[in-house]
Image (spheres, rainbow, N blue to C red):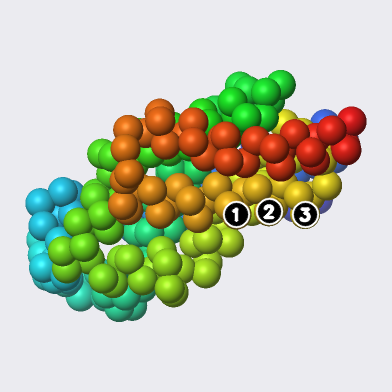
Amino acid sequence: MSGRAAPTPDDTPASGGVVKPLRPTLAEATRGLLRARVLDAVDDLLRQRPWASSSMADIARVGGVSRQTVYNEFGSREALAQEYVLRETDRFLATVQQAVLDHRDDPRAAVAAAFDVFLTAAADRPLIRAIASGDGSDELLALVTTDGGPVLAIATERLAGVMQTGWPGVALEETRLVAECVVRLAISHAALPSGPADLTAASVARLLGPYLDGVLGAAG
């Protein structure tokens, strides 16, 4: 008789011999909660003051942790800002994904809906308000624009993937081009609004409409 211990439910292969993913360890789960707590503290502070006026000590106090803990986890103030911007980017993109898929039969309406949802959601988000105010938010603005290559790349790839799902006949390079235009225009209009979100969305859809009609017509 083998002395090997019987597998636990989490170790047992699922049907077809595929092992189920292991749950995060307690240390991993605790670290995830800590990082979320600190990022939430950044969000709370940006609702009250510009990023330039928020010190690591302030963030630690609002997050209920020590200043050294924040440094140990994120390394620097700049790295913390980058992490916050990336999280907000992901949240914004989640709001537009369904809008595109809900209008997959009408590409112009899909672009307008995605733009409208993004701008409407952005109006209440501290990151976009900080950028739009231009008051002490240069560090955050640089992360999204001048130094924001990673942010723009993530946003473009994610939106292109959604569009590819909705319009599988269109070449990937075409959906990436549309996605990048939408992302850059969305950030620009959120930072410096030119009118109500729905009117701006309609204008962008009208601008990109002929191109969408052309690539979809070619794909059909």
Percent across and percent down for residue 50 are: 15, 61
- The amino acid at mark 2 is Leu
Look at the numbered discs 1 and 3 and tell me whether their residues touch, using CB distance below 8 Å. Answer: no
Q: Position of residue 150 (x, y in %)?
A: 52, 67
Q: Secondary structure at mark 1?
A: helix
The amino acid pointed to by label 3 is: Glu
Q: Amino acid at mark 1?
A: Glu
Q: Are marks 2 and 3 in contact (CB under 8 Å)?
A: yes
Relative to residue 201, is residue 128 depicted above or below?
A: below
Mark number, residue 69: none
The label number, if any, that marks residue 177 in the structure image? 2
- Which quadrant holds residue 16? top right
Q: Which mark is residue 180?
A: 1
Instruction: Determine whether label 1 and label 2 are within 8 Å by CB.
Output: yes
Q: Identify which residue is drawn at 28% across, 40% down.
A: 123
34 and 53: which is toward the camera: 53
Q: Is residue 30 left or right of residue 113?
A: left
Q: Which of 29 and 191 lies nearest the eye of the viewer?
A: 191
User: Gap between marks 2 and 3, in whole Å?
Assistant: 6 Å
The answer to whether residue 15 is above or below residue 18 is above
Residue 162 x/y as whole percent: 66, 39
Query: Which label belongs to residue 173?
Result: 3
Residue 210 in which image quadrant: top right
Among numbered discs 1 and 3, the one appearing first in the sequence: 3
Q: Rate crowding at label 3 as few (under 14), some (14 to 19) or many (20 or more) other CA atoms within 10 Å.
A: few
User: Residue at 57% across / 34% down in the picture?
Assistant: 206
Q: Is residue 78 left or right of residue 184?
A: left
Residue at the image point whose x is 40% and y is 54% from the top: 188
Q: Is residue 181 above or below residue 107?
A: below
